[in-house]
Image (tube, helix red, strand yellow):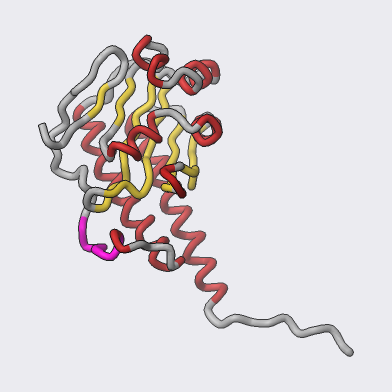
């Protein structure tokens, strides 16, 4: 018999193009976030099974390395932000509070040149779909204007992630309310911990 004819699925190429364009758009959010916050790396993670995080896209020289560290070690600001659905802002990763909280991740990240990490959840109502994370090579807190800009960028990333999930058929019952916006927008940020780690609690 002759060679088997390749099966053509109508619309498949268009779906691939859309997904590629969407991932490129999410990476542009990472790049914009890095520029706005003077970061050396940024990453967007998506929520996996049993509360795990998986890097979706990264930018900068250390975004991929930090993402891999947290995925392999199963600890770090991204995991905490995902679990608590709050931003986890760590202006000094080498501080005792940080190394106590993440005994494997913190020293490993410092070793590759990361001094501060800021993780913002991509939220839908009360559920975190992923994390937008910023990595700096110098210590210091984000300014209020920088935080506000990152929250808006996180909202944009959330919309893209929701659209991607809907097209892939991987949404769950909590994603049905797609009209809801990020739970971070409009929250008043307030520190509830110190010594190198600051968390935000929208209820305070």
Whether residue 180 appears in this view of the structure is yes
Q: Nearer the viewer, residue 12 or 143?
A: 12
Q: Position of residue 166 (x, y in %)?
A: 38, 66
By secondary structure, the bulk of the magenta-drawn segment is best described as loop
- Is residue 181 positioned above or below 148 on the image? below
* Residue at the spot 15% in from the left edge and 36% down from the top edge: 202
* Residue at the spot 42% in from the left edge and 18% down from the top edge: 115
* Residue at the spot 53% in from the left edge and 19% down from the top edge: 108
- Image position of 10 (left or right of 24): right
For this orientation, the residue located farthest to the top is 96
For this orientation, the residue located farthest to the front is 50
Query: Magenta stretch: residue 178 in it?
Result: yes
- Is residue 40 positioned above or below 187 on the image? above
Q: Position of residue 128 (x, y in %)?
A: 31, 46
Q: Position of residue 100 (x, y in %)?
A: 39, 15
Q: Position of residue 1 (x, y in %)?
A: 89, 90
- Image position of 3 (left or right of 174): right
- Is residue 115 positioned above or below 69 on the image? above
Magenta stretch in the rendered image: 175-180
- Image position of 84 (left or right of 61): left
Q: How many marks?
A: 0
Query: Magenta stretch: residue 8 in it?
Result: no
For this orientation, the residue located farthest to the right is 1
């Amino acid at each position: 018999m002759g060679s088997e004819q390749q099966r053509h699925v109508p619309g498949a190429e268009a779906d691939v193009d859309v997904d590629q364009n969407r991932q490129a758009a999410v990476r542009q959010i990472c790049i914009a976030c890095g520029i706005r916050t003077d970061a050396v790396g940024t990453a967007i993670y998506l929520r996996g099974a049993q509360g795990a995080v998986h890097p979706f896209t990264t930018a900068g020289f250390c975004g991929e390395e930090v993402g891999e560290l947290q995925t392999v070690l199963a600890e770090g600001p991204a995991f905490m932000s995902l679990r608590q659905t709050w931003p986890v802002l760590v202006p000094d990763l080498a501080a005792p509070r940080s190394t106590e909280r993440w005994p494997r991740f913190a020293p490993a990240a410092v070793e590759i040149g990361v001094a501060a990490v800021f993780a913002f959840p991509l939220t839908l109502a009360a559920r975190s779909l992923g994390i937008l994370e910023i990595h700096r090579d110098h210590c210091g807190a984000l300014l209020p204007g920088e935080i506000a800009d990152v929250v808006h960028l996180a909202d944009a990333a959330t919309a893209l992630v929701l659209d991607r999930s809907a097209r892939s058929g991987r949404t769950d019952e909590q994603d049905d309310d797609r009209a809801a916006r990020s739970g971070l927008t409009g929250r008043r940020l307030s520190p509830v911990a110190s010594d190198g780690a600051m968390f935000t609690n929208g209820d305070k």
